[in-house]
């Protein structure tokens, strides 16, 4: 196409004439319209990554308190001293030492034993440091630490029966008192599986379960005679004898057991807590703390398996 300078000039001139005509007629130039801003969504912070539920140990440290279940009537392991208004006993001192090593205070709860061994604590307490035997059945609902001490299961009879009951077999036809939901009750009912059993459970007995072992001894001490014998830990029997209960040891221990702290599996995650308590217990074995506590309350060292 050929370029025509005259055509370009005519276009420009036409534009100028049109502008002049509009101005002469009193019109005003068309308003300039600003571009409409596109609405933007409100600024939001980026979502934070989820760390997952806290371990029970973290919750305890934030709270500053670990809640320990114990037996209020199980001397010399645990009991409330009405004179001093303080908790005392081997389990109590062990729990307080664990709390000290975790850097938290200790509070005690006293649920029934069968509620502790059943699991599903619903956060009512954090750990049991209450002379619990490690068993396969309990391990289904509870996580265990290493054993912090050991116990010997033994029979005791009323002192007035020592001339007629001389062996475990002589308990046939007699009533034996025992704490319910314990290995002692399982043993008497033929349900305890343990390589440490040295004497088979007596046949033909009446098993009388109560809330806690000490009730058996205290009932006999009160003069009542519905129980002929009791099966419990040897150190509990010894404590009863020292306090004047009219009972006497029957034969030798029938089995031994390892006793540990336990944590409810349903309180997961709790692996950090289980590890921290296990470390504390192992350290207490190593530095002699558990041995000293055993000597204080039992008179002999039950921090190691008795021979």
Image (tube, grey):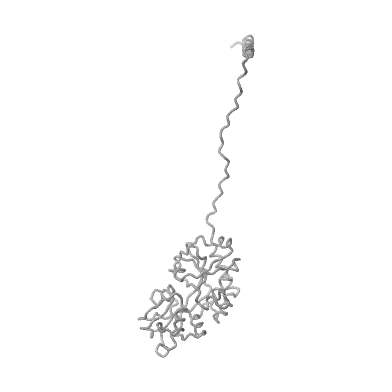
Between 227 and 82, the one lying in front of the other is: 82
Percent of width and height locating residue 69: 51, 69
Question: Is 59 situated above or below 37?
Answer: below
Q: Is residue 142 left or right of residue 287?
A: left
Whether residue 35 is visible here, answered yes or no, is: yes
Question: Is 279 situated above or below 36?
Answer: below
Between 183 and 157, the one lying in front of the other is: 157
Instruction: State the residue lying farthest toward the top.
Output: 6
Residue 115 image-quadrant placement: bottom left
Name the quarter where the N terminus is drawn. Answer: top right
Between 203 and 247, the one lying in front of the other is: 247
Question: Is 267 situated above or below 214?
Answer: above
Instruction: State the residue lying farthest toward the bottom.
Output: 163
Percent of width and height locating residue 114: 44, 70
How many numbered tags mark residues here? Answer: 0
Percent of width and height locating residue 264: 48, 65
The residue drawn where x is 56% and y is 73% is: 94
Whether residue 8 is visible here, answered yes or no, is: no
Percent of width and height locating residue 282: 56, 70
The residue drawn where x is 53% and y is 54% is: 52
């Amino acid at each position: 196409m050929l370029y025509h300078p005259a055509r370009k000039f005519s276009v420009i001139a036409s534009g100028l004439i049109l502008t002049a005509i509009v101005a002469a007629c009193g019109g005003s130039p068309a308003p300039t319209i600003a571009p409409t801003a596109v609405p933007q969504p409100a600024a939001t912070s980026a979502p934070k990554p989820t760390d997952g539920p806290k371990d029970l140990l973290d919750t305890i440290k934030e709270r500053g308190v670990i809640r320990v279940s114990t037996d209020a009537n199980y001397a010399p392991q645990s009991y409330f001293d009405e004179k001093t208004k303080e908790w005392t006993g081997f389990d109590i001192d062990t729990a307080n030492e664990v709390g000290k090593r975790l850097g938290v205070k200790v509070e005690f709860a006293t649920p029934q034993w069968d509620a502790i061994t059943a699991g599903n604590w619903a956060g009512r307490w954090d750990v049991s440091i209450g002379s619990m035997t490690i068993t396969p059945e309990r391990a289904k609902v509870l996580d265990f630490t290493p054993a912090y001490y050991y116990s010997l299961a033994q029979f005791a009879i009323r002192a007035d029966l020592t001339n007629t009951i001389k062996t475990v077999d002589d308990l046939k036809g007699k009533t034996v008192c025992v704490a319910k939901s314990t290995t002692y009750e399982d043993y008497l009912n033929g349900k305890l599986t343990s390589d440490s059993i040295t004497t088979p459970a007596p046949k033909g007995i009446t098993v009388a379960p109560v809330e806690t072992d000490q009730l058996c001894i205290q009932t006999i001490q009160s003069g009542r005679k519905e129980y002929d014998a009791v099966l419990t830990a040897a150190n509990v029997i010894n404590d009863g004898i020292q306090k004047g209960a009219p009972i006497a040891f029957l034969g030798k221990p029938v089995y031994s057991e390892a006793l540990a702290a336990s944590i409810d599996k349903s309180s997961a995650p709790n692996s950090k807590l289980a590890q921290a308590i296990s470390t504390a217990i192992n350290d207490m074995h190593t530095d002699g703390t558990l041995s000293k506590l055993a000597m204080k309350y039992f008179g002999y060292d039950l921090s190691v398996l008795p021979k």
